[in-house]
């Protein structure tokens, strides 16, 4: 019986070689088609990309440089130990310097986003959330402090002198982004000691100004308040509110008090007192208003929402030294401060500034009524 052409075509198969891999081709009445055997070379091409190659080469270069650097440091430590200490100090400073610029740049971008959001939402500054207001305040102060250093770095080769000055005077020239955590605590203590030198001068100024008070009841309350502070007693909010009318007009209003008293208030906000009296008055008033707006933002947010670092910073800015106080004590003091600040009017900024002494100097000593 003769075999049909259709059966022969269906059963026949031809094996072709493609590279190293066999490819089966089945014959049929129609055009031949390749059977399913995938070459390994095609699989390699699909799973290997130039980006992976570059990533692998980059990783190899980084690991080689790291190995060479470690070997160089071991050589310096073994052969030149004194130079190695200097080298380590320089490298730590350089890395901290780079980190500081990165943090400052990130803060700048964050403030830019806040400003754009304010413009798009048509939100005024006093209505911003607390953290946005605090970020704007901090970045503005940082930029004011950093601008002179940037200007000094403009002339050719002046950057070497600037690096030396930054190494010798980090507290005076560098902003907080370039400080280590240990330096941050240390420098806050130094700054607080500087303003603490003026505490008793402020109290003495209040006692001297009491002679100009005509109302005998207000005069007695003011002298009692000063006497409590001098004797080491931490006053309560009602003691302060009893004399609040004296601080909205003469003789203790922000635009009515003596120039010497204003100059003693300047270090509380880290402002220079070497300016004309009218200029000092305006600066004190604007800084006090800004802190009062921040107080209201904390009340809107809720004091319990602040973490420990935010709590420490808030207390430090308002005149309290948080170095040896627990988070519970800081929260207790800030609660009392917000109770005092919440009822103040904008015309009573002078009382706000004086309470940075009256409500901080004896805390956390026991209160007596």
Image (tube, rainbow, N blue to C red):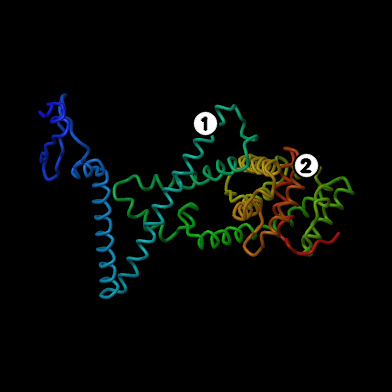
Above or below residue 342? Residue 239 is below
Q: Is residue 360 above or below residue 242?
A: below
Task: Tell me the residue that label 1 is attached to.
Answer: 116
Q: Position of residue 203 (x, y in %)?
A: 74, 56
Quadrant where the image shows the C terminus: bottom right
- Left or right side of 89 for 302: right
Q: Mark 1 or mark 2: which comes first in sequence?
A: 1
As drawn, 293 above or below 27: below
Residue at 24%, 63% in the rendered image: 68
Mark 1 or mark 2: which is in front? 1
Of all residues shown, which one is farthest toward the right?
217
Callout 2 crowding tier (Cα within 10 Å): few <14, some 14–19, many ≥20: few
- Quarter of the rendering containing residue 292: top right
Residue nearest the observer in this picture, 291 or 112: 112
Image quadrant assignment for residue 134: top right
Q: Quadrant for the N terminus, please.
A: top left
Residue 343, numbered label: 2
- Residues at marks 1 and 2, CA–CA distance in whole angstroms: 32 Å
């Amino acid at each position: 019986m003769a075999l049909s052409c259709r059966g022969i075509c269906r059963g026949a198969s031809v094996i072709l070689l493609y590279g190293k891999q066999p490819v089966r081709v089945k014959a049929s009445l129609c055009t031949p088609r390749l059977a399913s055997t995938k070459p390994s070379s095609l699989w390699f091409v699909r799973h290997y990309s130039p980006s992976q190659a570059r990533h692998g080469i980059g990783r190899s270069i980084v690991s080689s440089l790291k190995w060479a650097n470690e070997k160089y440091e071991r050589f310096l430590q073994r052969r030149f130990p004194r130079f190695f200490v200097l080298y380590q100090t320089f490298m730590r400073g350089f890395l901290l310097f780079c980190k500081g610029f990165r943090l400052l740049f990130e803060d700048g971008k964050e403030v830019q986003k806040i400003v754009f959001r304010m413009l798009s939402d048509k939100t005024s500054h006093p209505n911003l959330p607390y953290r946005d207001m605090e970020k704007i305040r901090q970045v503005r102060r940082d930029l004011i402090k950093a601008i002179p250093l940037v200007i000094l770095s403009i002339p050719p080769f002046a950057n070497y002198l600037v690096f030396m000055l930054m190494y010798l005077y980090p507290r005076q020239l560098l902003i907080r982004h370039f400080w280590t955590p240990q330096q941050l605590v240390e420098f806050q203590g130094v700054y607080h000691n500087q303003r603490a030198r003026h505490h008793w001068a402020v109290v003495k100024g209040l006692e001297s100004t009491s002679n100009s008070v005509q109302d005998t009841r207000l005069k007695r309350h003011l002298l009692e308040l000063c006497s409590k502070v001098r004797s080491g007693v931490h006053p309560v909010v009602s003691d302060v509110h009893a004399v609040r009318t004296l601080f909205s007009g003469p003789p203790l209003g922000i635009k009515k008090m003596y120039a010497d008293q204003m100059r003693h208030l300047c270090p509380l906000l880290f402002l220079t007192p070497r300016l004309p009296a009218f200029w000092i008055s305006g600066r004190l008033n604007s800084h006090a208003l800004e802190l009062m707006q921040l107080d209201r933002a904390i009340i809107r947010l809720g004091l319990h929402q602040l973490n420990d670092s935010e709590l420490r910073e808030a207390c430090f800015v308002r005149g309290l030294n948080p170095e040896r106080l627990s988070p519970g004590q800081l929260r207790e003091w800030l609660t009392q401060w917000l109770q005092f600040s919440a009822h103040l009017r904008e015309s009573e900024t002078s009382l706000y500034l004086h309470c940075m002494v009256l409500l901080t100097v004896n805390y956390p000593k026991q209160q007596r009524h």
